[in-house]
Amino acid sequence: MPDSEEMDGPSTSGLWRQRHMREKVEQVLDEVRPALVTDGGDIELVDVGDDGIVKVKLTGSCAGCPMSQLTLKLHVERILKERIPEVVAVESA
């Protein structure tokens, strides 16, 4: 019979890391959100991949804004990468 470490193995620690990363991303998005809400928009976290790619959905007035990709890259991605070094990129879902 495997010991508890073997049972917890990589899949359990991987799930923990993914959940922890998702929580950290949510916390940072909560800090970014007020600037978007001021302009009538918002942001939803869709996915945090094992590869460090964060997928988000801009909503409200941000969804149709021609500047949304600049907001995503120059504001949201920059801050996430500064605060969470594991984040490689932020993409629109």
Image: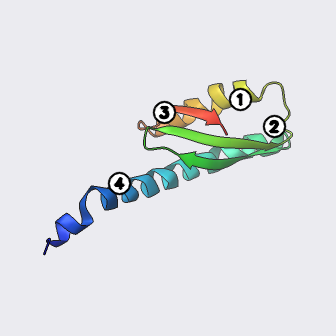
The kind of residue tagged 1 is: Thr
Above or below residue 27? Residue 49 is: above
Q: Residue at x 49, y 44 (%)?
A: 49
Q: CA distance from mark 3 to mark 4?
A: 23 Å
Above or below residue 5? Residue 13 is: above
Tags 2 and 1 touching, CB below 8 Å: yes
Identify the residue position indicated by label 2 in the image. 62
Q: Residues within 10 Å of mark 1 (few under 14, many from 20)?
A: some
Task: Point out residue 63 in the picture as x, y percentages from the top left corner.
Answer: 81, 38
Tags 1 and 3 touching, CB below 8 Å: no
Identify the residue position indicated by label 4 in the image. 14
Tell which circle, 3 or 4, labels the residue nearer the N-terminal end: 4
Q: CA distance from mark 4 to mark 1?
A: 31 Å
Q: Residue at x 58, y 34 (%)?
A: 90
Identify the residue position indicated by label 1 in the image. 71
Q: Secondary structure at mark 4?
A: helix
Q: CA distance from mark 1 to mark 3?
A: 16 Å
Judged from this view, the residue extending furthest toward the front is: 1
Identify the residue position indicated by label 3 in the image. 82
Task: Point out residue 8 in the picture as x, y percentages from the top left corner.
Answer: 26, 66
Q: Secondary structure at mark 1?
A: helix
Tell which circle, 1 or 3, labels the residue nearer the N-terminal end: 1
Tell which circle, 2 or 1, labels the residue nearer the N-terminal end: 2
The kind of residue tagged 4 is: Gly
Task: Point out residue 14 in the picture as x, y percentages from the top left corner.
Answer: 35, 54
The kind of residue tagged 2 is: Cys
The kind of residue tagged 3 is: Glu
Tell which circle, 4 or 1, labels the residue nearer the N-terminal end: 4
Q: Secondary structure at mark 2?
A: loop
**Tally of marks:** 4
Question: In the displayed structure, does residue 30 sit left or right of residue 22?
Answer: right
